[in-house]
Structures are given as structure tokens and as C-alpha cells.
Image (tube, rainbow, N blue to C red):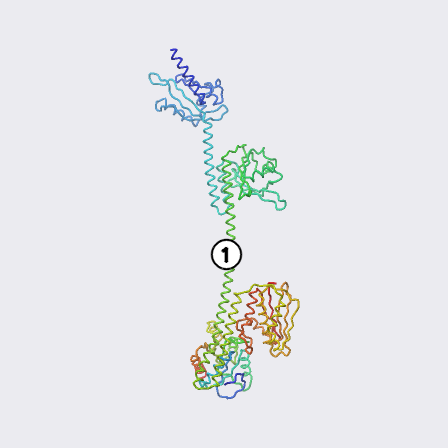
Amino acid sequence: MAIGGERTLVGEERLNFVIEGAYLGFWDRNMVTGAVVRNKYYAEMLGYSPRELDDNVMVWEERVHPDDLPGVNKARQDHLDGKTPYYEIEHRLKHRDGQWVWVYSRGKVMERDVMGSPLRMTGIIQDLTERKKAENALHKRDHLLSAAAVASQKLLTSADHDIGIKEAIVAIGLSAGVDDVFVFENFDDPLTGEHLTRHRFGWSQEMATSMYSGPVILNMSGSISPDWYEILSSGKPIHGAMREFPRDVQEFVEKFRHFVSALIVPIIIEDHFWGIIGFGDRHTEKVWDSSDISILRLVAESIGGAIIRNKKDELLREAHDDLEMRVQDRTVELEAKNAEMERFVYTISHDLRSPLVTIQGFVGFLKEDTRRGDQEKIDIDLQTIEDVATKMDRLLGETLELSRIGRVANLPEDVSFGSMVKEALDLISEEIKKGQVEISVARDWPVVCVDHMRIVEVLINLVENSIKYMGDQERPSIDIGHQKEGEKTVFFVQDNGMGIGPDQHSKVFDLFYKIDNRSGGVGAGLAIVKRIINVHGGRIWIESDMDKGCKINFTLPCQ
Amino acid sequence: MMDLGCKYNRKVENLPLILLVEDDATHAMLIMRTFGRLDLPADLDWVKDGEEALNYLHKYEYEKDHRMPNLIILDLRLPKLDGHEVLREIKHSEELSTIPVVILSTSKVDEDILKAYTNRADGYLVKPVDFDKLQKMIKYIYTNWIG
């Protein structure tokens, strides 16, 4: 007996050792009397000292959470009936302070009577609080993660980042179980340069769609602990109870939202501190855990991404619009050039047919005259053909030059207009003398930036034209000068010749148009002049009337 | 060789009178020599621009023993007054509108042709770059409009 007793004692000691080590609660129930023996830890688990936890206090039906009671009873009954090898169940027990404690209970019937009825049942009970907490945290994290995923997706796919952000914070707010979500955007005061931040987006438990009205601006520099700006702009979060925050923040928050605690995470976009996103709790001094911080960080990054994307999209759109406009301008330009080209070709083909009509005609006559041997007529025929061929050649030459003017432009250089006038007059001095024309030239010429040779050509053409169309003028004179018209200088060549009627003013610049057939030349001169002036970006126009002389004006914008 | 200047004197009264309005001297020579070569009996007067043409026509309107041309051969590209303008003036004038006007031009562009007919041209012919064709054309004009 002693030996058995000894053995039992050692066994029990060992058991106690094990139980103590595992921090297990232990219970031993007498199925007949209903009395339960519990160990120290059991009591401590529920907030009692072992002495306090007696059967009066520990009324099973009151201790077990009402939702768990049915399950507990069934589990016990199943085991007592022999259906299960163990009694095993997780349930809640009421702690002394009224909180519920999750426990894991496992036990077994140890003694039965000869009938098989249970006499004694013992088991252990384990505090699951920590495990449950961990489980909850994991759940919460899962929940938050999926919310963050939703938020990210919204931010990634929204065309307008404003909408994306609004939708994202709703998703986050709902699953984070917070009272408020807010987003502030930083900006600098244009006058003082202070760092300010203003409320941009918000979500609140209370209202389904919350938009705070009016501007809500917080000064981030100076008045607030400058630490905040440092901390946030370096990418670190700030969190805690409102009463621990700087005074200004508290005052601001008082006016605005009455948070008790808050978590603030910065939104950094390409190294620039764009703003903040945060959670606010209006009821408890919530302790923000790593899940909350991580999730908010994730959303902050997604928001940053959405904003960048939006900006880039906008830039792309602008570039695209800009390109479109330029293409349009270019198209209009090309169409105009095309139209000009068509007119050109029309004029050419038209005006080159004319001499061919003559040539063919006179070749026909020549054949007959040759057969008849009419030498006089033969000479005339040949001369006519020759003259017309020469004229055609000149026509072609000037046409070629005209087309070249548009394409080949020498680099403009700065040159005094006066020097070009002098050069032109020198080149046609013979004609001037022959026409006995008196030329007067102005002084104080401005410097212009032009293709030097071309402008000399223009001047030669204009002066030659004036000489040609002097008509019956007894004292032919040409005046070359300049005058101011507003900001621009207008250059002119004026003569006292036969003039040009107003109805002809526009035709005069047409290719091959001739004012009078008595004069020589093919009539391309003024067309070429006009082309040169236009290519330089200037305008040319006539002031003239019949028998009242002619004044040709032009501008050269590059002055 | 015919005188290439403007003639205002009537030499022979009973020959049909044709007014040629043509700015290119060589073309005028061609046409007039063709008349001679084909022995087409007619008096040809030649003016070199639209203004001269109208002066010519109006002058004879008011003179007592005026002689209006039996036919006007009109080129379109004329200095001073465009051929289309001349045509329009002739066909809008009571006295002159009865004179047949045949356009003889280097232009074969639709716009010119349609414009001429709109202004009531009696015919439109394109100057051919072919000697024989030109000869035939002149003959045709004479036959059709003079007889």
C-alpha cells in the first residue's frame, strides 16, 4: 500500500510539475457529487485566487458563454455516453472582470463503476487568449489586405485619380474598422512660403459619403512641432493618442474632427512629400498595430502611383493635343502650298502653250513659203519662230527661278537696306541713264536681316518696271525710300509713270501678267518679287492709279 | 502683210467686218494670214486689249454711218480688261449683243468655258497647237458665222 501510495505521490508530483510548466489549468470532477477540484492556474486564469473559486462562484452555466454552452454540454454528453474518446472543446469563460476568456478544455472519464457509469472525470484547460488574439490579428490583416487590394485596384484602374482615391479610402475605411480616413495634400503658400496642407479626401463611418465642406488647412511648418514635417517627409508614420500630439494639432483636430487617436502616414511621390493619409478614431485611444500601418503605407503608395500616372497621362494628352494642332497647322500649310502649286502648274501649262501655237502655226506657213520660194515671207517666218522660242526660254528660266525662290533660300544676314539700294542702282545704271530717269534715294536706312542677293533682285525689278512704265512722262523720276507705319518700317519704290488702275492691282503680281504689251519681258518679274518678299515673311502692295504714278510698298519683318 | 495697227477707216463697204481681239501679236498674225491664205473675203480689224475693243465698239455705236462688225473673235487673257469682262459688256449692251462673239483661247479649262457660255458667248474654240487644225478652225468660224 505504501509502495502504491508512494508511487501515486510521485506520480502526482510529476503531474503537477508538468502542469505547472505548461501553465495549464487542471480540473477534477466527481461525477457523483458534482464537486470539482481546480488548480491554482485555473483560478488565476479567470482572475480569482484559488480560495475564491468555489462552487458558488463557479456556476458552470453562468461561467460559460451562452453561445458556447450548448456546444459544451453536447461535447460532454457525447463523451460521457462513450461516443467520443475525449471531451474536448474550445469555449469562453467569464473572467472575474466580466471579460470573456477563450479556453481549450480537454478531459476524460477516469473511473467508471461496474455499470460503466462515469464516476470521475479530469482534464486540463488552457488559456487561448494569446492564440485568439493572434488569430484575430491575422483575420484583420487578411481583411485589411483584401481591402488594400481593392483600394489598389481602384487606384490603378480609375481614369481620374480623384475618383480612384475616393473609392480607395471608402474600401479601406470600411474594413479597417476606423471612424475616419482622411487625405491631406501639401502645398506652399505662394506669399510666405510656409508649408501648408489642406484636406482633400475623407471618409467617415457616420456618413456614407463624406465630404468636408470648406477649405481645411493646417500649417505644417513653424507653428507645429517642426519634427512632424521632418518625420513625415522622411517617410515615417506618426501615431498615437491625440493628447500626446502637439498643441496646434490638437486645436486643429478639435475644430475639425474630435479624434481621440490617429495614425498618419506620409504620401511620398518621387521623393516629394505630397501629403498624408491617415486613420482617426473618435472613441478610443486605439493602439495602432503594424497591420494598420502597413496597410496605410500600401494605400499611400498606390495613391502616389495613381497621382503620378494621372500626371503622366495628362502630359501625354497635352503632347498629343499639341501634336494634333501642329499637324493641323502643317496640313493647312501644305494644302495652301499645294493650291499654289496647282495654280502655278496651270499658269505654266497655259502660258507655254501659247508660244507653241505660234511656232506650229509659223512652221506651217514656213513650209508653204519655202515651196513657193517666197524669201521675204520665209525670213519673217523664221524670225517670228526664233523670237517666240527665245521668249519661251526666258519664260521657263524665270519660272524655274520662281520655284527655286521658295526652296533654296540663302541664310539671311544683317545688311543695311541702303547698301542694297546702291548695289541695285549700280547694276542697272545703263537703263537708268537710257531712260533719263532721275532717282532719289532716302537716307538713314535701317538694317534688315535678309537674303541679300534676293532683295537686290527685288529692287532691280521694281526700278526696271518703273522705268518701263513711264509712259509719256516728260520728267521721269523714281523715289526709293522708307516710312514708319506703327512698329514696322515700310519700304517703297515710287514713280511718276503711267500708273496702274485699281482693278489691276491684284492681277499685277500674277505670273506672266503684263500690264501692257508694248513693253518687253515675259511678265514674270513682279511675280518673282512678290515671291521673294513673301518668303521673307513680308507683305507687298501697290498704291497707284491711272496716270498718277505707281508706288510699290513692301515690308520685311525681320528687322 | 497686213497693217498691225488699229484701223478705224472702212476701205471696202461690202466685205464682212471681223473684229479680232487678241493680245499676242504673233497669234494675230497667224489668224490674219490664215484668212488671207484661205482667201476668206473679210475685213479684219485687230485690237490688242479689252479697253481698245470696247472703245472701238462704242465709238461706232454713236457715229452716223457706223459699221458694226459681223463677228468678234475674242481671246480671254487680255491686259487692261479681261476677255470675260469684254464679253459680258458686249452681251449686256442692247446695241452690241446681237453681234456674234466667238472665243478663241489657249485655255481649255472648264471654268473658262462655262464662264464664257454663262456670259452668252456664241462659241468657244481652243487654239490648237497644230497648223492644219488651226486652218480648219478659221475656215469653220468663217463658214459658220459669216457664210
Q: Is residue B98 visible?
A: no
Note whether A537 is above or below A363 in the view shown. above
- Report the residue marked by disc 1: A324
Quadrant of the rendered structure where residue A119 is? Answer: top left
Report the residue at 42% width, 22% height from top: A124
View extreme (right): residue = A443
Quadrant of the rendered structure where residue A10 is? Answer: top left
The image shows residue B136 at horizontal and vertical percentages of 42, 81
The chain ID associated with circle 1 is A
Amino acid carrying mark 1 in the image: Glu
Report the residue at 64% width, 78% height from top: A475
Viewer-closest of B138 and A370: A370
View extreme (top): residue = A2
Q: Quadrant of the N terminus of chain A?
A: top left
Badge 1 crowding class, 10 Å Cα cut-off, few under 14, some 14 to 19, many 20 or more, is: few
Image mark count = 1
Q: Quadrant of the C terminus of chain A?
A: bottom right
Quick check: A120 left or right of A375? left
The image shows residue A306 at horizontal and vertical percentages of 50, 45
The image shows residue A76 at horizontal and vertical percentages of 39, 23
Report the residue at 61% width, 79% height from top: A472
Viewer-closest of A437 and A322: A437
Note whether A218 is above or below A334 in the view shown. above
Q: Is residue A150 visible?
A: yes
The image shows residue A327 at horizontal and vertical percentages of 50, 58
Q: Secondary structure at mark 1?
A: helix
